[in-house]
Image (spheres, grey):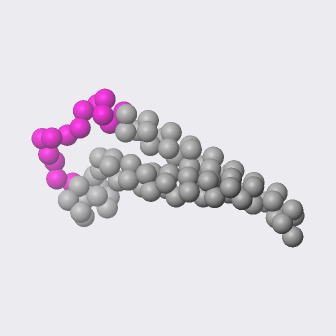
Amino acid sequence: MDVLHVILQVLLGITSLLLTLLILLHKGRGGGLSDMFGGGMSSGLSSSGVAERNLNRFTVILGITWAVVIIALGLLMRFSTGADS
């Protein structure tokens, strides 16, 4: 159980970092905090529709993976505490 616990924790760390990166890669819609940091400026080099859709897909898949890892870690911690003590 300890090996599975470590693997899930490492996977959680990796998915958390990647999810943060993917969320920051999304194009700002304006009117929010993105305007404060220069995201409100329009640029001629906007991303194509296909690239934006793929970024959305990767973000959703990674978000679901992140949630599953958290649930698995919670269940593992919940049911393994009785065996360790």
Residue 1 is inside the magenta segment: no
Q: Residue furthest top?
A: 50
Q: Position of residue 40 (x, y in %)?
A: 21, 54
Q: Residue at x 15, y 41 (%)?
A: 45
| Relative to 23, 78 lies left or right | right
| Relative to 55, 30 lies left or right | left
Q: Which secondary structure is most common in the magenta stretch?
A: loop
Residue 50 is inside the magenta segment: yes
Q: Residue at x 56, y 43 (%)?
A: 64
For this rendering, which residue is in front, 82 or 29?
82
Q: Residue furthest front?
A: 3
Q: Position of residue 6 (x, y in %)?
A: 63, 58
| Relative to 61, 82 lies left or right | right
Q: Residue at x 37, y 34 (%)?
A: 54
Q: Is the C terminus in the top left, top right, bottom left or bottom right quadrant?
A: bottom right
Magenta segment boundaries in residue numbering: 40-53
